Amino acid sequence: MPSLPSTSGARLALATTLLALLGLCLAAFALRSARRRADFAFTGGGELRSLDPHAVTGVPEGRVMRLLYEGLVGRNPKTLAVEPGVAESWKFSPDGKTLTFTLRADARWSNGDPLTAHDFEWSFRRILEPATACEYASSLWVIDGAREFTTGQRADGSSCERDGSKVGIKARDERTLELRLAQPTPHFFALLSLHVFVPVHRASLEALMAEHPQTWATRWTRPGALVSNGPFRLSERRIGEVLRFERNEQYWDARNVAMRTVDVLSVESWTSALNLYLAGELDWVDGAIPTSLVPELLGREDFEPRPYLGVYFYRVNVTRAPLDRREVRAALATSLQRKELCQLVLKAGQQPALSFVPPLTGDYRPPKTFGESPEYARKLLADAGLAGAKATGKLRPLELHFNTSEVHRDIAEVAAEQWRKALDLDVRLRNQEWKSFLDAQGKLDYDLSRSSWIADYADPSSFLEIWTTGHENNRTGWSNRQYDDLIAAARIERDPARRRDLYANAERILMHELPCIPVYHYVSQNLVDPGVGGFGQNALNEQSPKYWYWRSDAELAEVRSKSTRAARKVESHGPAAGLYSPARTGAAQ
């Protein structure tokens, strides 16, 4: 079996090809000269919304939270099986409603303080507090009394007193945490492994809130002030540039954390990110790879797209005319030519989405509710009295909103052109950087807005819960009581077949009403140095930084010898250039 060729000429040839497409990026060398290289570096895709784990929802923020924090449980990066985190063990009561965790005796905060069950009790209540505005708060409503505490309402909509003493979260002692569920919940452990359900350091947070009531949120997450409990701690932050993390020596498993330092670069341009990767300044690039480069990247051993439990879609602001009419939303959905978009624009194996839930979500099979037909889309508008609306002035121009990215712009341009040709619609593009983009979405300041939803766990509930009335991640203005009732029933249904049917019926309603327009189902697009070990290639593309390490030359050679596919790629396409050098491999043990 052939090994990776090491001739400098072969490496130079492929590097030259890619760099010709990307252009020369001087930022990499400026960065190299300005600071010492971290053991591992990746891009967060832009400036993060926050470093408060209870205030974030995005994938970039989630990856940083896993550097800083650890919850009661985690997930294995290969199998996604639940594994111990701060909790070393747990047990259920016979009725499946009470879950008791025993915390590790050596769990510590990064400042050396003991981490106790009281920290989890206080942090979970903070998530539920309305003032926190945590967008995942409703996920904890499976805990007895949690919904009532957050909303002041019961499940039937009647008012009640917000009584914290009735919430089923209790620290029995320093190491024992008890969670009491309203009903047995099959996916509860998957919920607890999410990056948001982690503890925060109460003493440091409350001290800053008291001393700086107006600016505590920004002061608390500064290096030196932020106290965390994960495998790394924040040591440096340059807004708009870089976050640096150092190994947290107080972490209970610090001896098994190989990386000493990790950098997260704020790079929104994926062209720039790829240049930094090729220059050796980044070890992992993920996300919106420029579509023109995908054919060049396919066949390299460091780029292997895989099925990914995520959906790319457009939110529809149903509170704005004419998008408040289902016929208009359905016309937009059925006139998109998704196969063309996937093949001609994306090129990495993405699949057209005619459902919101991806088809590979456990045993669940999404219902087929609508198809693609520009002719039917025109009929929908005609039946609504809107045929030729642009010419007659019946439809105003629509705005298609997206965050900064070459790929999002490419997709938006194609979608706008398809809608123009099929429906004679005037669709104008609006681009915003990440934080402003999220703010605009939250305020319903858009017509159509680019979005994606990546599963928090491999279950239809992870995709369908967000469309319930008032859910923090709904952000469309859409509400449907029948949909809410079906989701509520599925939440507590213990029979797997019946539970799947309830979710399928809910998705039929969602895809009939179309407050969201699915575009395609994702594949992961990790471009990662072959020398990285412990990197999780899983359906959630979820990474556990504590497992990352640099392979030795011998281990890397053994991995390649066992991978016939990697060997074929190397033989056909040549070596991965500009990515890996013996000087780097195994250096950060």
Image (spheres, grey):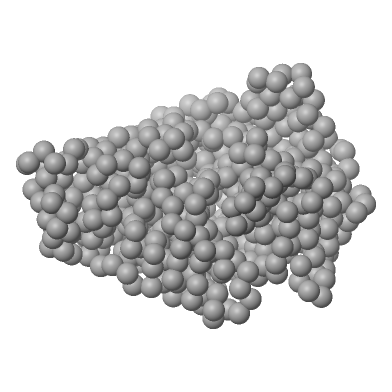
Q: Which residue is drawn at 60% across and 49% down?
A: 136
Task: Locate residue 247 relative to residue 521 in the image: left or right.
Answer: right
Residue 399 visible: yes
Q: In which quarter of the image is residue 98?
A: bottom right
Closest to the observer, 33 or 475: 475
Along the line of sight, which residue is nearer the eye, 253 or 90?
A: 90
Q: Which of 313 and 513 is in front in this view?
A: 513
Residue 301 vertical position relative to residue 448 in the rendered view, above or below: below
Residue farthest along the right direction in this orientation: 173
Q: In this view, does 451 lie above or below 343?
A: above
Residue at x-position 14% and y-position 58%: 383
Q: Where is residue 368 in the image (x, y as percent from the top left)?
A: 34, 72
Q: Where is residue 336 in the image (x, y as percent from the top left)?
A: 23, 57
**Residue 209: percent from left, percent from top:** 74, 25
The residue drawn where x is 65% and y is 27% is 217
Q: In this view, does 126 lie to the left or right of 311?
A: right
Left or right position of 46 against 445: right
Q: How many labels does the image show?
A: 0
Percent across and percent down for residue 256 are: 77, 54
Question: Is residue 8 visible in this depiction of the protein?
Answer: no
Q: Quadrant of residue 235?
A: top right
Q: In the displayed structure, would residue 147 be above or below residue 339?
A: above
Which residue is pictured at 17% across the width and 41% down the height?
Answer: 395
